[in-house]
Structure formats: C-alpha cells, structure tokens
Image (cartoon, rainbow, N blue to C red):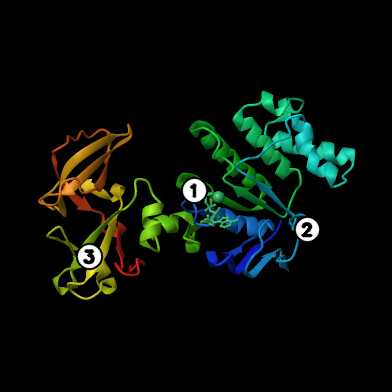
Amino acid sequence: MATISLKDVRKDYGRNPVIHGISLDVANREFIVIVGPSGCGKSTLLRMVAGLEEITSGTIEIDERVVNQLEPRERDIAMVFQNYALYPHMTVFENMAYGLKIAGKNRTEIAERVSSAANMLELGPYLTRKPRALSGGQRQRVAMGRALVRDPAAFLFDEPLSNLDAKLRVQMRLEIKALQREVGTTSLYVTHDQVEAMTLADRLVVMNGGRAEQIDTPMNVYLKPASVFVASFIGSPAMNIIEARVAAESRGVVVAGRTIDLDHLRLHLPAVGAPVLFGIRPEHIAVSETEKVDLLLTVSAVETLGADALAHCYFEGGKKGRDFVVRLPGTRTVRVGEHLPVVLDRAATHLFDPESKKRLN
Ligand SMILES: Nc1ncnc2c1ncn2[C@@H]1O[C@H](COP(=O)(O)OP(=O)(O)OP(=O)(O)O)[C@@H](O)[C@H]1O
Ligand SMILES: [Mg+2]
C-alpha cells in the first residue's frame, strides 16, 4: 500500500499541451476518482502514473519514491483497463495466475493468491472455465482479479465498467466499493460517469481541458462546486445556471424581473447592477405552498421518472422553452403549460463570476 503524489505534472504532445499542471496528494488507502468529459486528459494522467506515458515536466512519487524515470513494472502498480483483454485460450485460474507466474512466484503461493482473490470476487466456481463461457460482469471480475492477485502498492482503473450494461455496472460498482473497503489499496479510478464518481470516491478530481477544476470529497463538490463547469458536470439533472444582476442595496439578485433576497450572501455579491451567474439545483426548488413566490415558471415539458418528475420550465414572460428544471415528487402531477410559482432553498444557492466562471460564495 502506498501514497501517490503528483507535483505540477504536465504533458505536451508535440506542441499541444494536454495536461496543464496537476498536483494531487493521494493518502494511503484513499480511493480517488478522476472524472471529466471525453478528451479532458483522464487517461493520459493515469497512464503517466502507470509509466505508460512520459511526463513533460513535474514529479510523480509513489510511496515517497520519485518514479518519473521508472519502467511500469518497477512502479508496483496494477492497472485495469476498459478493454481488459483476457487470454481466450487460458482458464480463469490461468488468466489470474499469469502475472504471478511471469514474476516467478512458486506454485503454492500462486494457488493461494488466486484462490483468495477468487473468493473475494466470487469467482470460485468459474476457475476452470475459459473467458468465452463467462458473462461480461464475470469477465470484468477476472480482470479485477488479475490486478488483485499481484497485491500492488496501488490500483489504477481506467473506465473498467464502461463496457457493461447498466445493471451490471451498478452491481460491479458496489463490488468495487466493497473490495476497496476490504483490501484498502490506494486507488486512482478514471470515469466519465458522474454517478460512479460520486458513489466510489473518497475524493474526486474533476477535470476539464487538462486542468483539475476541483479536488474535494463528493459531497463538497456537490454542495460547493468551485466553478460553473463543475456545477454543471456533477449532479443530475444539471444545476440551473441563470444570468442575473445584483439587486439594489445588494439585497440579492434579480432574475427574470424578480428580486431573490440573498441576505446571507451579501458579502459575496459584486457591485449593485453587476452581472452574476446564479445557480440552483432542480432538487432545491419547490412549488410554493404560501404567498411567498421567488419565481413564476411555465412548464414546457415533463419527464416522469417514477419516484420524481422533472418539469422543464421557462420564466413567465420570458423566452419560451428556456430550460429551467424543477424536480418534483413523482406524486405531484404537472401539465405542460401549467404555471408553477416556486420557492428556492436559500441555503443551496450558488453564485459564479460571469467572467472567470469561478464560485463567488
Ligand atoms: N498519443 C497522442 N498524441 C497526441 N494527442 C494525444 C495522444 N493521446 C491523447 N491525445 C490527446 O490528449 C487529450 C486527452 O486524451 P485522453 O485520452 O487523456 O482523454 P480522456 O479524458 O481519457 O478521454 P475519454 O473519456 O474519451 O477516454 C485528447 O485531446 C487527445 O486527443
Ligand atoms: Mg480515456
């Protein structure tokens, strides 16, 4: 087991920078999830830690040892990829044992380690089968087992579940979580699936365009996103982000002609009249049951999800179809064209700078 430390790690492909300087300290036994849209540099970052890709500058340490110049096999890490090609002519046992055999371990030790990993992954009954006689989820578990038997200092995962169907993905997600609790090996896990990211991570690294926009626990990222990008990327459906202006006397913000009082954020507001981006998540908006109304909305589309429903709305008097989403309990029926007076949860309001797109409060 080990710590991993990245110090201002950069990567250029030719003259094209793809990682702009990322620093990250991963504690022993910590599970870090690197999440971000396609092409933001997640795999590149992971491959640099693995030693499969050279770094342009910066330092990578594994267990306080600088590994910049070390070959992948000298770094004591195990990697699980999206395309976890198993050897088709080998049984599950042989697939899992292969790395240990190459490393020159003796028969008894190999048998013990494979059997222990197989138990953990509930692969015991399949050890003599060939991969073609396994389901997708079972094959994925063999790939995990192959990494597990090596008992490495750290695991690196690159979208290991993205080839599985939705149901299996959920199941494997829970298994990985349980496994991590049991084995406790320091892990870096790459995904573009934000649910996977939220549920697995001790801490998240939210990446955008080769930069780490925020590094924090899933709940802090959800509650206090550091930028408009993070606010829109984490949380489903995405946070509503609206152009607003600071109200007179800095009482709050003006949205669609209505003043939303934000007394508690007074100190974070720019000058009166200045533009500001105002954010609120769909789940922090409720249909008003009293005289108090923050915004008047008109429903333009409804998505019924069972437990809840998403009402896509526009501001009354505003442009039709403008997308402002409200999450309602599934028991409440809403019709297209209906007017919804809503109130906003003040404790869950977000302010961003329209220029830098950074969080203000
Ligand atoms: N060998 C290479 N030469 C040049 N550019 C590359 C190379 N490998 C990756 N890139 C570029 O680096 C950027 C980051 O790629 P990377 O594979 O790390 O993205 P990613 O976040 O893993 O995306 P995805 O979610 O699609 O897997 C992309 O713009 C990609 O085109
Ligand atoms: Mg990738």
131 or 281: nearer the eye?
131
- Distance (Cα) linking label 1 and label 3: 34 Å
Disc 2 target residue:
74
Picture mark count: 3
Classify residue 52 as left or right of residue 290: right
**x 24%, y 48%: residue:** 323
Q: In which quadrant of the rendered view does residue 11 lie?
A: bottom right
Does label 2 or label 3 sit earlier along the sequence?
2
Residue located farthest toward the front when viewing the structure as drawn: 14
Can residue 272 be seen in the rendering of this structure? yes
Classify residue 196 as left or right of residue 253: right
* Label 1 residue near ligand 1, CB within 8 Å: yes
Q: Secondary structure at mark 2?
A: helix
Q: Residues within 10 Å of mark 2 (few under 14, many from 20)?
A: few
Disc 1 target residue:
192
Q: Residues within 10 Å of mark 3 (few under 14, many from 20)?
A: some
What label sits on residue 262 in the rendered view?
3
